[in-house]
Amino acid sequence: MYRMDEKLAQIRAGKYAKGDFIIADAKDGDMGPSINSTGPHRAKDGTWSRYRTRAEFLDKIQAVVEQDVVDIMLTSVSNLEALNERGVYSNSRVKPVIRANDATDCWVFRGASYASEPSRPFRTADLAVAKSLGADLGLYSITFNNDLDADYFSLEEFAAFRQDALQNDFKYFLEVFNPNAPLGLAAEDIPAFVNDAMIRCLAGLSRRERPEFLKIPYNGPAALEELASFDPSVIVGILGGGAGTTRDCLELIAQIERYGARVALFGRKINLADDPLEMVRMMRAVADGALNSEAAVREYHGSLARNGITPTRALDEDVQITEAVLKAAA
């Protein structure tokens, strides 16, 4: 059994403890930002002149899986296939998961302007093919914009995806982004709008049609507590967003666990770290309550120094909380 399944069973049974917090590494950026999502190919002195190649990116994914700290590895179908050819998941307890759709608000590659328009649904991945490659769980993403036509179309496509998933005995978790092109929504209305839109689209679904868990932005303690307490059968996960400082990453882990989230799905916060494996180790330490976020940053920098890695930010800068939503609750 994958470690994720054991933890989800504990959470659903009402027996959650800090060690049951689920950490996912989201290495699916090739389905959106594309080449630049692989991250910079850095020398130990911190300098870089190009992005990683696909082979180098696969090396990074393999290293995280073999570290055996994260519970989920999210990739594209093509990279899942390549990792299988390397035997990466043989005897691993890390769950392989694929991005099951790639709506237009994820098309943020260099020079593109698609994300300025209301999100439109689109799917590249074939669920039957993904399942033949060993993935029976995928991420489905939807974005509500208070745009009737766009949101209606997105929900119709979500219904079609669920039918496909049922026919292929394929499970999914649901990502709901904040609006990318909102109509008539003030910034302060967005957290409640997202919560309501998400729960509304789940209300008509039976248990077997529902997502395994959610993946949403962190819109502050009040919005997260409202969602996590509304229906305990809905497990809430939080996406990582931008890279930020190391303290931003680790403080986000601490806050979302405190306010009811049970899953963290971080991409850039891991991939762009000076030492991704050490970042993952610190995330686990904070989620488990072994270290607070500040102490974990200091431990992280100590590890960088021991390994001769020049940090992108000096410790006194990297220990700061810079994201507004985190500052407000720190």
Image (cartoon, grey):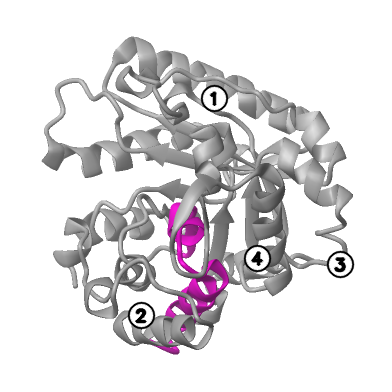
Q: CA distance from mark 2 to mark 3?
A: 32 Å
Q: Within 10 Å of the Cα at label 2, are there few (<14), some (14-19), or many (20+) other Cα atoms?
A: many
Q: Residues within 10 Å of mark 3 (few under 14, many from 20)?
A: few
Q: Disc 1 or 3, which lies upstream in sequence?
A: 3
Residue 98 painted magenta: no
Q: Nearer the viewer, mark 2 or mark 3?
A: 2
Upstream in sequence: badge 4 or badge 3: 4
Write the start and end of the magenta stretch as one range.
262-291
Amino acid carrying label 1: it is Phe
Say whether marks 2 and 1 touch (CB < 8 Å): no
Q: Is residue 192 left or right of residue 80?
A: left
As drawn, is 93 to the left or to the right of 51? right
Instruction: Say which of 294 and 275 sits in front.
Output: 275
Gap between marks 2 and 1, in whole Å? 40 Å
Amino acid under disc 2: Val
Q: Which residue is mark 4?
A: 64
Q: Please state, as top left, top right, bottom left or bottom right, where the C terminus lies in the image.
A: bottom left
- Relative to 219, residue 13 above or below: below
Q: Is residue 6 left or right of residue 228?
A: right
Residue at 62% over, 69% down: 7
Q: Nearer the viewer, mark 1 or mark 3?
A: 3
Task: Tell me the tag on residue 297.
Answer: 2
Q: Determine whether label 1 and label 3 are within 8 Å by CB.
A: no
Amino acid type of the residue that numbered disc 4 sits on in the rendered structure: Val
- On the image, numbered disc 1 is attached to which residue? 158
Query: How far apart, in angstroms, are the residues tagged by discs 4 and 3?
Result: 15 Å
